[in-house]
Amino acid sequence: MEIREIRAMNGPNYWSIRRHKLIVMVLDLKELEQRPTNKIEGFRERLEKMFPGMYEHRCSVGTPGGFFERVDEGTWMGHVVEHIALEIQTLAGMDVGFGRTRGYGEEGVYNVVFAYMEKSAGRYAAKASVRIAEALIEGKEYDLEEDIQEMRELRERGRLGPSTGSIIAEAVSRGMPWIRLNKYSLCQIGYGANQKRIQATVTSETSSIGVELACDKEDTKHLLEQAEVPVPKGEIVRSERGLKDAIDYIGYPIVVKPINGNHGRGITINVNNWEDATKALAEAKNVSRSVIVEKYITGDDYRLLVINYKLVAAALRTPAHVVGNGENTIQELIDKVNEDPRRGYGHEKVLTMIKVNELTMDLIKAKDYTLETVLPKDEILYLKDTANLSTGGTATDVTDIVHPDNVFMAERIAKVIGLDICGIDLMTTDVSKPVEETGGAVLEVNAGPGFRMHLAPTEGLPRNVAAPVVDMLFPPGSTGRIPIVAVTGTNGKTTTTRLIAHMVKMQGFKVGFTTSDGVYIQNKLMMTGDCTGPISSEFVLKDPTVNFAVLETARGGLLRAGLGFHYCDIGIVTNIAADHLGLKGIHTVEQLARVKGVIPESVLPEGYSILNADDDLVFDMRKNLKSNIALFSMDENNPRIIAHGKRGGLSAIYENGFITICKGEWKMRIVKAVNVPLTFGGRAAFMIQNCLPAALTGYIRGFRLDDIKMALETFMPSPSQTPGRLNLFEFNNFNVLVDYAHNPAGMRAIGQFISKLDGKPKIGIIAGIGDRRVEDNEEMGKIAAEIFDEIIIRQDKNLRGKSEDELIAMLKRGIASHDENIKVTVIPSEKEAVSHAIENAADGCLITMLSDVVPDALSLVMKYKEEEAQKTYKVTAENIPNLE
């Protein structure tokens, strides 16, 4: 088998609107296409032996064991690979269940689609599942555990930590969007100007001074002492001499900890002799130059969690330990504890497995024990000196028994240090009594405290401590969203996007928008090139200055990674026509419509999907939608528009020369099309069509009709506002039209427009496109012959998989099918082709240049225009009489 491609979806996609995290692997079965599973001797038995858990895979049968029934009947290896990929992820602690395998459009080639939790682990599972299937086919031994462990490690490296993950999960449960900003824990909740950021449990609202204080234990202790908060007696030391002086002052037992540190790093507790003290000093100095030496306070270790200056949870923390039974060795007791199904690798489960490290061995040695010692019955042996869950510790929820005086103290400490989220470490014998009575003390105040012990305590009630964080960041009624308008279709996307952005900007919004020629933030070009994919969408949605997004969304990005956002407020589909067919497994216009249909299916229920009622494929999309529906049509008598109006629906139509919005059966005329510059006096019908969904968008967003009218009247077809979209340059003796039309439907629309323009002869500069089908290029040649009197064939810089000669031959065949006698000139260089046409232009001619590299074409034409203007100015200046 051969893996052709592996793509990772991370948003609504062609395969599923609801399941965003999907791996799509294009798999060529080669000769295995002729060998279904029932023709491979012993395959079922070997598969079941390796994966007994697959019995739970119901598959299309719908009952346990259903997948094995399919294997017995005979299924193709792509289907098996899908199920292996799901099962090995589950074995690695990532329980995923969605999968499907569909034909790619070539014999023996399949799209193998399955869910993932962590992208890197999902990609690994794709490759590993093929290796495993091949080993099972050949009856070879395979080390499955190596793959499982590798995926565990990939999962731990890639996943959000439990604290960050809980906040994100809470935000998602409230319908809030989020974006991961780096490979660690920095995340954005909300979009644009309404975003907030978190990094673990530090937020964009957290005081930087508060964090600095919490990280400096000396300053923290000083402030708490001043506030009459009980803290252990201690000293700051930097050397063994200072350590000795501190011990002489404080007395044993002591705690040694770095002055700048967190999460238990470099801390040694209950030190009772000089040898251990010097060793503890060295450990602490690995973390911080200055070290705190404090009196060791006896009692239990409690963590009090304060969020938004309110105590929300408290836990009793116990270091990793074993309890003797008089029969088993210490190592055997550790192994038994690790057999607890609640313990796992890293953060995969509620508890973490206990690992024996140097510190563990030191603690065991201090008791004159070894790992082979049989621990006496009921003796507790601590294996770590701190109670962190990440080192195998346990937690018991005690929130409901914390004494009110201790609650008051914790909330006051948060204010004293200035931390909106903080974890307070309290040592006391009984948290249900005031600290003053028990002789307890506050050991530390932590910025960015871990939530794991509260979310899933070993004992006691789990606390949703993520909820108050989200409440703090987003007060009631706030979702963190900004309005998003998504525009898709085959033709007209970019112009519609730019027109809507222009309209929205005129309403005072700070707009970010993406197009096939770049990304714009408040009309400033930030990125160039085809920016219609998920990365460009996220670029806009991450920008903190943007409060309205208009996003052109093309098929390429959708198929490559899915949408760059999960929901939008308005989704527009302009039209569906044959384009890019044969790429990424999309071979028919019906499949293409399914790709584009992802946009309206991602519209929020209270939002609007705006559909072209003149296009059957677009109109049929309404059947799968949960949002409101608005329609547009160039024909007011379209039966679909009439029926929609009778149901009280919203639509936009072109009627009696007007761009009109209809609410129910009532008409609201906005502007005559001839007064909209974009339509070239009403001659560019496809531009009128682009105005209809734009006008609807403005109306849905609550813009006044007069403001919509003004926006339409002030949007000019020019290189600055609509680069490469019907840009007409008027030279002294001829005209040049530059347009992006790059498929048969687009060329036909241009042909209709050109037929209404003066100018003879009509000269067309066209190019074949390498990633289009042969029949598409031939059809574009035929349409060119129908439109133009003369044709110049040029070539794109990127031939996209085909040779220059092949593309020229395709266009020539298409041209000849309409008119064998039409004049055809081949000039491969775009620059030379344009230069030839302009420098040899006949008086009154119209040169039309169809280009998909818009900036280059525009620059060249504008250069000629500037040169002509300079010549005209010079001649005019020479003819002015000398007034002296």
Image: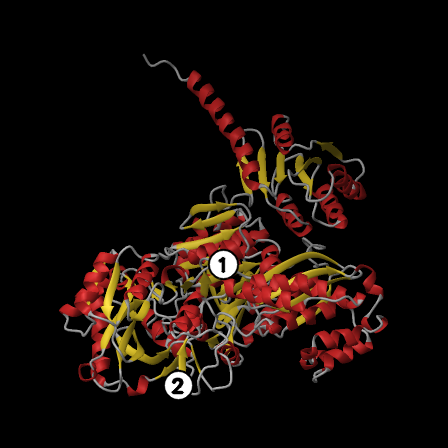
Q: Give the total of numbered labels.
A: 2
Relative to the observer, which residue lies in front, 783 or 754? 783
The residue that disc 2 covers is: 461
Q: Position of residue 565 (x, y in %)?
A: 50, 63
In screen coordinates, is 1 left or right of 411?
Answer: right
Image height check: is 182 above or below 336?
above
Callout 1, which amino acid? Ala
The span from disc 1 to disc 2 (Cα, nearest Å) is: 53 Å
Q: Position of residue 764 (x, y in %)?
A: 66, 38
- Given the current orientation, which residue lies at the most extreme top position? 884
Q: Position of residue 651 (x, y in %)?
A: 53, 67
In screen coordinates, is 495 left or right of 817?
Answer: left
The residue that disc 1 covers is: 694
| Crowd rating for badge 1 (residues with CA inside 10 Å; few <14, some 14–19, many 20+) | many
Q: Nearer the viewer, mark 1 or mark 2?
A: 2
Q: Position of residue 3 (x, y in %)?
A: 71, 57
Relative to the observer, which residue lies in front, 469 or 796? 469
Q: Dot 1: what SS? A: helix
Res. 216 image quadrant? bottom left
